Image (cartoon, rainbow, N blue to C red):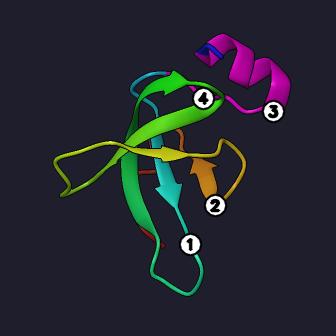
Amino acid sequence: MSMSSIRKAHGVPAKRGQRVRYTRGGKPPELGTIRSADGGWLYVRLDGEGFTRPLHPTCGLEYLDPHQQTVE
């Protein structure tokens, strides 16, 4: 599934290079960058990590605009 297909299927503004805030069960939110998409998953590199991780487009991801770059 391409990035365009993910946008259409899930109604999210995902695009390569997009900054996101990732929140997962009880842990503090983390910032990251969308690097790619494959098979319905977004591959995100969280700040401070040297690898990408597959994340579902609607589970725990908040899509940030360019002015919203901090963890709150």
Q: Which residue is mark 2?
A: 60
Three-letter residue code for mark 1: Arg
User: Which of the labelled discs sits on residue 24, or is there none?
Assistant: 1
User: Which of the labelled discs sits on residue 14, or is there none?
Assistant: 4
Three-letter residue code for mark 3: His
Q: SS at mark 2? A: loop
- Asked if the stretch drawn in magenta spans residue 7, the answer is yes
Labels in figure, total:
4
Is residue 66 visible from the viewing direction of this image?
no
Q: Is residue 2 above or below residue 59?
A: above
Q: Is residue 37 left or right of residue 44?
A: right
User: Which of the labelled discs sits on residue 10, or is there none?
Assistant: 3
Q: Is residue 58 left or right of residue 46?
A: right
Question: What is the magenta range?
Answer: 3-15
> What is the distance, in whole Å, between disc 4 and disc 3 at their CAs?
10 Å
> What is the distance, in whole Å, between disc 2 and disc 3 at their CAs?
13 Å
Picture quadrant where residue 23 is located: bottom right
> What is the distance, in whole Å, between disc 1 and disc 4 at their CAs?
19 Å
> Residue at (81%, 32%) from the top-left corner?
10
> What is the distance, in whole Å, between disc 1 and disc 3 at their CAs?
19 Å
Q: Is label 1 in contact with label 2 (beta carbons under 8 Å)? A: yes
Q: SS at mark 1? A: loop
Three-letter residue code for mark 4: Ala
> Residue at (72%, 48%) from the top-left corner?
58
